[in-house]
Amino acid sequence: MEEKKTFDKNSIIGFALIGLILIGVMYMNPNEDVVPEQDNTEQVETNSSTNPVSTSNRTPETSPQKGIASNLQDSVNSELAKRDYGAFAYSALQDFAKDDAVTTIENEVIKLEISNKGGEIVEAKMKQFDTYKGDPVYLIKDGNADFNIEFETNDGRVINTRDLYFEPNLTTENGNQVLTMRAKVSDLEFLEFYYGLESEDYMMNFGIRSQGLNSVISSDQANLSWEVKVLRKAKSISYENRYTEIVYLYEDGKDDYTGQGDEAIEEDESIDWIAFKQHFFTSILLTDTPFQKGKMTSRNLVQDEQIDTLYTKNFLAEVPLKLNNGEFSESMNWYHGPSDFDVLSSYERKLDEIVPLGWGLFGWINRYVFIPFFGFLSSNLPSYGLAIIVMTIVVRIVLSPITYKSYVSQAKMKVLKPEINEINEKFKDNAMKKQQETMKLYSKTGVSPLAGCIPALLQIPVFYALFQFFPSAFDLRQKGFLWADDLSSYDVIFEWDAYIPLVSWAYGNHVSLFPILASIAIFFYTQMTAGQNMQQASQPGMPNMKVIMYFAPLVMLVFFNNYASGLSLYYFISNLITIGIMLVIKHVIIDDKKILAKIEEKKKKPKKKKGKIGQKFQQIMEQAAEQQKKKQEDKK
């Protein structure tokens, strides 16, 4: 919060008196800056072979008027500093009080610049990563971040650390760089920011402490605010923005996030850390003692992709800091680095929750199955594209028994199709009776129309887990395969500059080949399954397979055009393998004549007694049929 600068009565009188004194001194000494001429008799000349030497019997003295003017100027500066900085005017009068002065600390992976003005980080550069344009990755640069602590002093002022000047002191301790930034009231009274950076580590020690300020600060609480306008780093700003949000941990292990709305606000208590998460990079403020409460605000800055091309979101975190006997004493950490699951989990502070692996079972599958397995494949194969292909093959082989059961169920339905058609024709004017007779046929033959859906439902956890895994896999970032130069972003075989309102919004300004191949594969797959079981579309409660046959490939073609090409590559290979497995099952394993024989044999067996649920369902069906029959009779 900016301090409103005011003048009290005494200050105005003081400034007026100082001004009058200065005018009087200048009037009485108009030539005080002119140096008096020296007496020529005091200079002795030597011959031409020696250099002239100047000597003087008079010792230079400082003009009394000059000393008075200097002291007056110092007094003016002191008064101005007290007006602007209150008790911290001492720092504002020192040589380090410069707006553009910065101190650099760095290691092998990160470079940070901390400003004397505000004592905050004004530049955070990733040394080992580039943007999609080949420029260095900056998490903080060109004034996109603000870190501030606000507190009140005994003279009624509201102090903001962003306005104060801090004295830097850079040292080395055990090979690690340590920077202290002090905003001073005096040499023994100060507010200090502590930065400690170890070798090859993205995590930095950060502390806020004070000494001797208990007589300066009037309140027992200060307010910390941390704000960042997130810089764009990826080829698709909308895709990157989809994975950009605030994530935080609270109440001993719970995690939450702000989401993707134009403006989202979350408030919780007992905050352990706050992460300003981007797609593949993140900044995290961690505290050893949980913040009492916190307010997190996320605002979307991308309203028009043609205009809003520099920033994705604006993040703001506001937390209170409790003072200890009027002194600051906060031990924290600050992370600036990649949103890499392995790197974040190595800190053992639940930072891996920042990576969106999915909730519940889906996250469990990614965490304990796909991440370790893909890590093993990528470290032993020459390319990440091959690792995706091998992983896809293994997944489809593991799920092949489910595919087999699904296809067998569809084959049984195909065999029963003539009898179902007879029932439909016979009771075409009585929907309830048609349903009853169809259910009787299923019960007699041991065929369930849902048997083909259940195996498909069992594959959903795997499908969704992989849908979350590929866009979040940091290892795929800027790794190419075939024509795709980055498996974490979309591949391009053709693009254009013109903005076409509906097309550009839904499809983009480019054509990706992997989604096209995946769409074709899905079309043939759904055609095979729909052709096997098309009669289900006419059964009440069953999905219309004709709609699915055309809708699924269309969704893949449009929706995945802007998604990670690694995900589209997976679906393309997955559907190819599934088609191959189904062809083998159809032409080698399953025989329709044998299935028909088993069904006929099942019809001859005595009917098993239904369970309580089956009896209850049968009773409900009979009651419904009786009610419908009565309604028809009443109409007649």
Image (cartoon, rainbow, N blue to C red):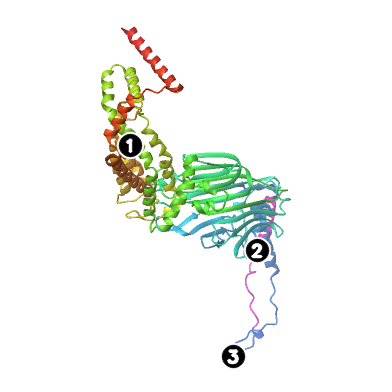
Q: Earlier in the sequence, mark 2 or mark 1?
A: 2
Q: Which residue carries the number 3 mark?
A: 50
User: Where is residue 157 shown, x and y percent of the image?
Assistant: 66, 47
Which numbered circle lies on residue 26? 2
Q: Earlier in the sequence, mark 1 or mark 3?
A: 3
Location of residue 531 (image quadrant): top left
* SS category of the residue bearing label 2: helix
On screen, residue 504 versus residue 246, left or right, reads: left
Instruction: State the predominant SS element of the stretch in magenta.
Output: helix
* SS category of the residue bearing label 3: loop
Q: Is residue 589 magenta?
A: no
Which numbered circle lies on residue 606? none
- For badge 3, the amino acid type reads Thr
Q: Residues within 10 Å of mark 3 (few under 14, many from 20)?
A: few
In front of the other: label 2 or label 1?
A: 1
Q: Is residue 250 above or below residue 16?
A: above
Q: Quadrant of the C terminus?
A: top left
The magenta stretch is: 11-39
In front of the other: label 1 or label 3?
A: 1
Spatial separation of the CA atoms under disc 1 and disc 3:
112 Å
* SS category of the residue bearing label 1: helix
Picture residue at 59% right of the left edge, 58% below the top: 116
Spatial separation of the CA atoms under disc 2 and disc 1:
103 Å
* Closer-to-camera residue (588/145): 588
Q: Earlier in the sequence, mark 3 or mark 2?
A: 2
- For badge 1, the amino acid type reads Tyr
Q: Which residue carries the number 1 mark?
A: 407
* Closer-to-camera residue (621/230): 621
